[in-house]
Amino acid sequence: MDPPSAARVKSTLRALVDQGTTVLLSTHVVDTVQAAADRVIMLAHGRVVADVQTSDLGMGELERMFLERLKESHEAGRS
């Protein structure tokens, strides 16, 4: 998506969430998640590896957590 389209999608998703609508979004674009979501559930290999409120995360923390949990999941898959 080009930047103007991505901004419109994030804005629309945020408006829906603010109205109390539940939005299920599957994406690897972490900045979109942080901009649009109140709660993030990360799945890896069909298992929940994180369940956090975005308000509890600082800038860049969601991406760091995503990369950390992904690495842990891959390492566990090799065991």
Image (spheres, grey):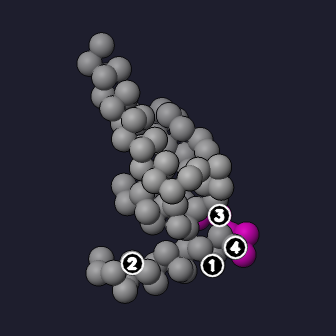
Return the mark for residue 22: 3
Please state if 20 lies on the left or on the right of 66 as rendered: right
Could you say which quadrant of the image residue 38 lies in?
bottom right
Magenta stretch: give its range. 19-23
Q: CA distance from mark 3 to mark 1?
A: 11 Å
- Label the magenta part by its dominant secondary structure: loop
Place of residue 40 in the rendered image (x, y in percent of width and height, measured from the top left): 56, 50
Q: CA distance from mark 1 to mark 4?
A: 5 Å
**Circle 2 sits on which residue?**
6
**Amino acid at circle 4:** Asp
Establish if 57 lies above or below 2.
Answer: above
The residue at 46%/41% (across/down) is 65
**Amino acid at circle 1:** Ala
Return the mark for residue 18: 4
Q: CA distance from mark 4 to mark 3?
A: 10 Å
Establish if 20 lies above or below 70.
Answer: below
**Amino acid at circle 2:** Ala
